[in-house]
Image (cartoon, grey):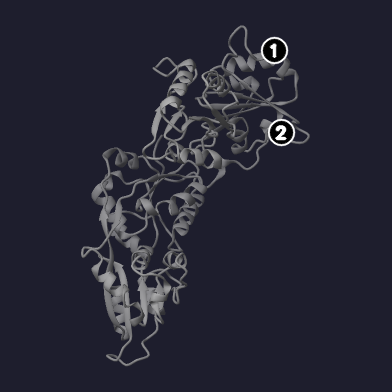
């Protein structure tokens, strides 16, 4: 069986290579280091065995020694497979991947190496510093700071001090005073710029700027990347400048739909805290009424759909778009219209505002006299406002309302709820998410900032005793993120954040 020595990248799951993700998706065993992000580990099958070898510098708390890790890989390869050895950064850049490769080869075990993006390059980039820059630094060197304080260091610090290259030091937080002293003793000026980045490429990344002379006094926690040289003084666009950087934002949507909101939040710099408070299930009749309506879609003049969930449920009951015949289709907003497009259907009516009132206002009156036709099918949630059916009936349409799905509250463990209380913001995408939050989490766990997808959800939040800080202008996931971004930018330095 083959063992894959895979680089997990510097931390941000978005920097994982396609090859690494593909191997993880079919791994039976994943042997990983301490700093590999849980979102990367989640790419492995649920049935995969995850083995935390806890490899860290100077550990004496039960973490395996390198020789023990080597032996474990050989053993696992003989009885399980495929085996992915997941290492932070690149396996061959100060990752001791070479030692593992030699041990596997000596035991007759096939192995492959999958390079990863090294923190030596990625972390400075995320902090706005290129390790090379014309006229500033024409090269860079990557060294370990692990033994900088030892009398006989494995690094020739004097040679490095004499060069003009950018020096990138990994694993040097604990020995930063010795690193600074050796470089200054070797001839580097005490005024040489230094960049220190803690938790690089992660949502809690922190960049500190100093000089060689000030490095020893700087408070630094591991993991940290130290960049020494004139390039460290450059201040290009930084990962930390994104509008929601460092924010923990709760996503309350159903698990299957959370990615549509979590993705844009992460792009804006936030750390999404996924807390699916509701689940979408078949209606109480098991979908019998929906199936009956779906069998005669072509008998209606209009089919009205008020959510993407209704689209998926209804179209799951028909062969293809031909089932609609000449019936026209109305979608309450772009998310619903987008769900239709994924099935090859273009909505005939999408109101400019994505609420029931706007749909009714935009809806045409029936061309036939009352009682002689004008039939509308409305597929919606089991519990919903009556604005649309009342409004269409007032226009003269004959309505048939069917339950397409039911929304129920999820089971959430107390640990997840306690984590929500430490978040900076919470997002609500429907009245049902508001109701579930109040029931399952309680207002005492409500984060300081509340964001709503639209006026209906805002009204539900207000009725529940919440003060809504941001409401989306466009009632979509992207609009919700945009509302939070505007809120953050309008209140630079004045946002009600959780302490610590």
Task: Give whichever of 469, 268 is nearer the camera.
Answer: 268
Task: Give whichever of 425, 303 is nearer the camera.
Answer: 303
Answer above or below: position of 26 versus 191. below
Q: Is residue 122 left or right of residue 418?
A: right
Which residue position holds label 1?
185
Helix or strand or loop: what does disc 1 sit on?
Answer: helix
Residue 342 placed where, x, y %? 46, 64
Most extreme residue toward the left is: 285
* Picture residue at 26% right of the left edge, 66% below the top: 287
Q: Which dot marks residue 285?
A: none
Is residue 294 visible in the rendered image? The answer is: yes
| Mark 2 crowd level (few <14, some 14–19, many ≥20, 10 Å Cα) | some
Which residue position holds label 2?
132
Helix or strand or loop: what does disc 2 sit on?
Answer: loop
Comparing labels 1 and 2, the label whose residue is closer to the camera: 2
Q: In whole angstroms, how far apart are the C-alphas of marks 1 and 2?
A: 24 Å
Answer above or below: position of 378 versus 41. below
Residue 41 placed where, x, y %? 43, 36
Task: Give whichever of 39, 300 is nearer the camera.
Answer: 300
Residue 175 placed where, x, y %? 56, 16
**How many numbered marks does the figure carry?**
2
Residue 397 placed where, x, y %? 31, 84
Q: Which mark sits nearer the N-terminus, 1 or 2?
A: 2
Answer above or below: position of 462 versus 389. above
């Amino acid at each position: 069986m083959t063992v894959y020595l895979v680089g997990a990248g510097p931390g941000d799951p978005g920097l994982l290579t396609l090859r690494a993700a593909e191997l993880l998706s079919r791994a039976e065993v994943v042997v990983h280091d301490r700093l590999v992000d849980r979102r990367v580990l989640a790419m492995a099958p649920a049935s995969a065995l995850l083995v935390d070898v806890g490899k860290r510098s100077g550990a004496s708390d039960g973490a395996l020694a390198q020789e023990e890790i080597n032996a474990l890989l050989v053993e696992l390869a003989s009885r399980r497979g495929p085996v992915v050895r997941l290492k932070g950064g690149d396996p061959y850049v100060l990752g001791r991947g070479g030692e593992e490769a030699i041990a596997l080869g000596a035991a007759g075990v096939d192995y492959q190496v999958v390079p990863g993006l090294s923190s030596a390059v990625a972390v400075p980039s995320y902090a706005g510093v290129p390790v090379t820059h014309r006229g500033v630094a024409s090269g860079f060197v990557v060294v370990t700071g692990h033994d900088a304080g030892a009398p006989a260091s494995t690094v020739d610090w004097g040679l490095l001090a004499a060069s003009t290259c950018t020096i990138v030091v990994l694993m040097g937080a604990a020995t930063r005073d010795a690193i600074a002293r050796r470089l200054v003793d070797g001839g580097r000026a005490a005024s040489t710029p230094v960049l220190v980045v803690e938790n690089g490429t992660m949502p809690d990344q922190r960049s500190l700027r100093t000089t060689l002379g000030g490095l020893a006094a700087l408070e630094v926690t591991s993991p940290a990347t130290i960049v020494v040289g004139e390039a460290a003084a450059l201040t290009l666009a930084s990962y930390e400048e994104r509008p929601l950087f460092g924010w923990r934002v709760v996503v309350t949507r159903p698990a299957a739909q959370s990615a549509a909101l979590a993705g844009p939040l992460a792009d804006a710099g936030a750390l999404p805290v996924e807390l699916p408070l509701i689940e979408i299930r078949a209606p109480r009749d098991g979908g019998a009424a929906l199936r009956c309506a779906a069998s005669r879609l072509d008998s209606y003049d209009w089919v009205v759909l008020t959510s993407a969930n209704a689209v998926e449920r209804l179209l799951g009951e028909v062969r293809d778009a031909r089932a609609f015949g000449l019936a026209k289709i109305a979608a309450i907003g772009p998310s619903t219209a987008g769900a239709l497009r994924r099935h090859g259907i273009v909505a005939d009516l999408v109101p400019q505002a994505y609420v029931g009132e706007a749909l009714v206002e935009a809806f045409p009156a029936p061309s036939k006299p009352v009682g002689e036709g004008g039939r509308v099918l409305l597929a919606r949630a089991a519990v919903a406002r009556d604005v649309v059916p009342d409004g269409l009936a007032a226009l003269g349409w004959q309505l048939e309302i069917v339950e397409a799905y039911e929304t129920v509250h999820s089971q959430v463990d107390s640990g997840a709820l306690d984590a929500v209380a430490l978040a900076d913001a919470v997002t609500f995408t429907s009245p049902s998410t508001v109701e579930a939050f109040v029931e399952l989490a309680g207002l005492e766990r409500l984060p300081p900032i509340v964001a709503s997808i639209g006026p209906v959800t805002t009204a539900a939040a207000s009725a529940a005793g919440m003060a809504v800080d941001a409401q989306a202008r466009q009632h979509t996931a992207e609009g919700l993120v945009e509302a939070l971004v505007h809120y953050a930018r309008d209140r630079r330095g004045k946002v009600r954040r959780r302490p610590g």
